[in-house]
Image (cartoon, grey):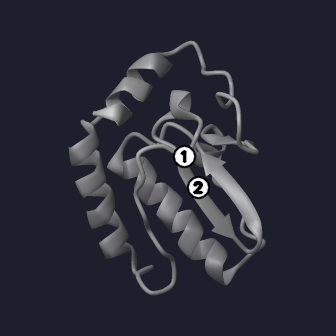
Amino acid sequence: MAPHRALKAAARRVYERSGLAGRVRLAFTDCLGPCSEANVVFVYLHGRPLWFRRVNSPELFGVLLEYVRTTVDDPSCALPRRLGAHSFSWTGGGVGPEPAADAAVLGAAEMRR
């Protein structure tokens, strides 16, 4: 996983190249709530909240943005398999979903840097 600042800078570059500027807003925040799942991306698309956990590489962020770009134009677009493993439901409050057995603590600590 890339260090937090490097990942944020890389995510901005991926977003700038995506062609979504002016169509989709990108904002960064320290924590959206389920910190154990860092890095969390929240997308509100066609009236639906979509949550993605452990988006910890520019490549995966690019896959997410490609899905968003496609879905903006075609709401019936299916979620790519690679993103399905990162998708989760969360309504706020509490500590978020149960982390998987792999280094969730490391991911949360990395996000706080």
Binning the other alpha carbons within 10 Å of mark 1 as few (below 14), some (14 to 19) or many (20 upward) gives some
- Left/right placement of residue 5 relative to residue 76 reads left
Query: What residue type is disc 1 on?
Result: Leu
* Nearest the eye: 31 or 68: 31
Depth order, front residue of 17/31: 31
Q: For the point 60% across and 40% down, which residue is it?
A: 86
The numbered dot on residue 42 is 2
Residue 38 lies, with reference to residue 14, above or below; the image says above
- Which amino acid type is shown beneath numbered disc 2? Phe
Q: Quadrant of residue 30?
A: top left
SS for dot 1: loop
Element at label 2: strand
Q: What residue occupies the far top of the structure in this picture?
A: 101
Q: Is residue 73 above or below residue 82?
A: below
The x and y percentages for residue 72 are 63, 78
Image quadrant assignment for residue 68? bottom right
User: In the image, which disc is placed on residue 32?
Assistant: 1
